[in-house]
Amino acid sequence: MKINLKIQRYNPQTDEQPHFQEYALEADPNERLLDALMHIKRFQDGSLGFRKSCAHGVCGSDAMRINGKDSLACKVLIKDVARKDGDTITLEPLRYLPVQRDLIVDQADFFAKYRAIQPFLINDEPVAEKERIQSQEERMRFDDATNCILCAACYSACPVIEKRPGFIGPAAIAQAYRFLADTRDRGFEDRLPVLDQPEGVWACENYFECTKCCPRSILITKRINQTKKMIEKHKAAEEEHP
């Protein structure tokens, strides 16, 4: 089928403002959008900039806005976003992050917020019998959050960040939950200052856009609300036993 890709272009060395450029091509409806981008890059315009790596929805490199929705180009099929010959697919870079070139954004701020929640197991207690035992039920409490590939799609999809740029963001909180809910972790107090503040968990307004767009089907909004409940429970316990 014939499709048109309307792609936001921006080269900070030559462009004053971002602009759109359209490319026409033939594409199999069952091909991935990433395949169409690669065709343009190889045969029409080698200057087009976008990220890719594994091309199988694991690395998260090719996250972008596709017809106004955040997703991975390698997981979206042409037939998902173009229904008939001549349809136009609009591609834009992720929101809230500086554009380095075309569909490539600078993720430094995203990863700074992610690192702030200390996304690693915190536990200095001696380990008995070489490992810390955990039941399957305990693992399932946070299992989906371990699937995060840090693509930043949820960050771009979040309406809160448009109003509050300092918001730590859904990905960081979901990863904080991954460790807070882990029975082996002892880092609650360490992460609390980042999470329990106006730009932390409390900024979330439950739009569910992060959950809708997550390519790994993580229940992000639920994990954020569970984190809020953990903090509330912790505060209540402190008030009861100061």
Image (cartoon, helix red, strand yellow):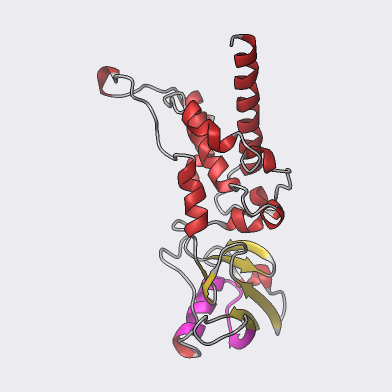
The answer to whether 189 appears left or right of 199 in the picture is: left
Give the camera-side residue of 58 and 229: 229
106 relative to 179, above or below: below
Residue stretch in magenta: 20-41
Give the camera-side residue of 183 and 84: 183
224 relative to 242, above or below: below
144 relative to 181, above or below: below
Residue 199 in the image: x percent, y percent?
63, 43
Q: Quadrant of the C terminus?
A: top right
Residue 112 in the image: x percent, y percent?
48, 51
Does the magenta-highlighted stretch encompass residue 33?
yes
The answer to whether 147 appears left or right of 9 in the picture is: left
Give the camera-side residue of 9 and 56: 9
Give the camera-side residue of 33 and 2: 33
The answer to whether 94 appears left or right of 42 in the picture is: right
Residue 104 in the image: x percent, y percent?
51, 71
Residue farthest along the top direction in this orientation: 241
Q: Residue at x 49, y 47 (%)?
A: 114
Q: Residue at x 51, y 24 (%)?
A: 137
